[in-house]
Image (cartoon, helix red, strand yellow):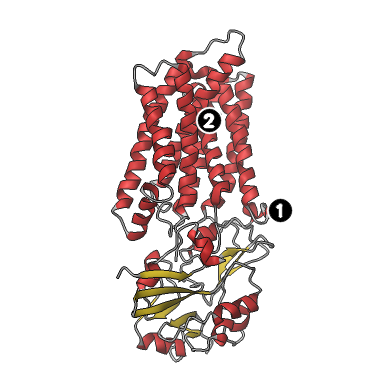
Amino acid sequence: MDSIQLLYDIHNGETFGAMIAIYFYLTGLSAGSFIVSTLSYGFGFERFKPLGKIGIVLATLLLVAAPMFLLAHSGQKLRVWHLFVYLRWTSPITWGSFLLILYPINCIIYGFFMFKGRKRLTRIFGLIGIPLALMVHGYTGFILAFGKARPLWNSSIMPLLFLVSAIVSGIAMMILVSVVRDRFFTKEHKINTDVVSALAQMLGWCLVFDLFLTACEVVVHSISHLGAQESTALLLTGSFAGLFLLLENLAGKVIPLAVVFLPRTRGCIPLLLIASILVMIGIYTMRYNVVVGGEYIPLL
Amino acid sequence: MAREKRFGFLVDLRRCIGCQSCSIACKQEWNVPVGRYRCWVKQVAKGVFPNTRKSFLPILCNNCEKPICVTVCPVLASYQKPNGIVEVDPHKCIGCRYCMASCPYGVRYLHPDLGIVQKCNWCSHRTENGLQPACVEACPASARIFGDLNDPASEISKQIAQNAVQPIKPEMGTDPRAFYIGLDDMTVEVKAHGHELAHTTE
């Protein structure tokens, strides 16, 4: 039984690869920072007001940058207009091509009214933007989930996992941005610890949820069908174990979680900064592990 | 009586000798780029000496009845013809590779120069004009049978009716239309991981 050996097989090349992982990462950051931006201007949490404007600027810029990686990945770059002319509504990429147009437009309108100081309109477009931000990142989870032959992708938890990790990375980026701006780009050079600690608390709870979803995925896959077991083994003991266990989960989630919640460390701004950077690296590693790890195991 | 044809493919693994004639015929017919294949024979060694045997598994597009590649293609480039063959429109494809990512059989590839995805279409330019696919013509062991599944008198319909046949990975729910006589699941399941693949393809 044991003596079976592969002599010859063909692998027709990588499909998505790191380019798409970067794309997913950038849309995630964009969605996350948009949501932080709407906390004050959409939902009225006045505490987060200092992050409203910088949040929307970053959300817009990141979402303009993100599709460039899609473009770079595409084999026929001059044919992107096909996405808007030949429509297949069963394909998440078709949903995405419209979301990727609507969401930045909404971001620009929302930002415009915010900078003009028109509160009511800002609020309206902020609230319209929330479902758009969730969809623009949620659809990327559907892209992977529709890859039904790859157990690491084909999971109904995938869109939710992508959303939560998007919010996690977005909040981490906003902590970083908030501290850097207060420290270097204001007259007082005084860090607004109120905002930072509130963001850190949010980051902590989002990390708990993210860890919970990741654990669900791994535990269920580890006793599911053969392909799912192989994919779990790849993450826990195989070639992706270092990336998954150490970088993504230990450095990217558990350590920041400890920093954010432990009474001795949670007030320390340098440690919070390091934790945010770790989270951002960790979430990128998560995108990489899911996209590249998902297609690492060949199909036949 | 003009009944709609539904093409199908049958590989008799009892006859396959693993000579790769099908792979070569396909390469010649379609000018498939270096390192990419529409059709190949996976080879596996089973057992311990002296009780060993090579096991062969010719792989080609299943031209599924419910093709996931067509479901996910965002630009209508992948489409299914009434005769069941799934084609890629070379003028529409944008090379996003979503079809490659979703296909459970890994039979699609990105053409490195054209930047579009290509795949086995059971030589539709031949088969729709009454000829056999290039790989079927080339097979010296007559292990490959191509024909109309809707015609109960065709060779493929008779063989499927009279033998135990199975497609690869029916659990994927794509309703594949390439069948195998004597399919060995161990041969299907054995895989090379990541970097090891480089050695098997080059």
Give residue A34's mark.
2
> Who's the residue at 36% across and 47% down the image?
A236
Give residue A223's mark.
none
Q: Secondary structure at mark 2?
A: helix
Q: Chain of mark 1?
A: A
Q: Amino acid at mark 1?
A: Leu
Q: Chain of mark 2?
A: A
Tell me residue B197's x, y (percent). 50, 62
Can I make out residue A283 in this image?
A: yes
Q: Secondary structure at mark 1?
A: helix
Between the C-alphas of marks 2 and 1, the distance is 30 Å
Kindly give the residue lying farthest to the top in the view shown.
A188
Tell me residue B200's x, y (percent). 51, 66
Kindly give the residue lying farthest to the front in the view shown.
B49
The residue wearing badge 1 is A78
| Quadrant where the image shows the C terminus of chain B | bottom right
Few, some or many residues within 10 Å of mark 2 (<14, 14–19, 20+): many
Tell me residue A35's x, y (percent). 49, 30
Nearer to me, B20 or A45: B20
The vertical placement of B116 against A39, above or below, is below
Tell me residue B29's x, y (percent). 64, 79
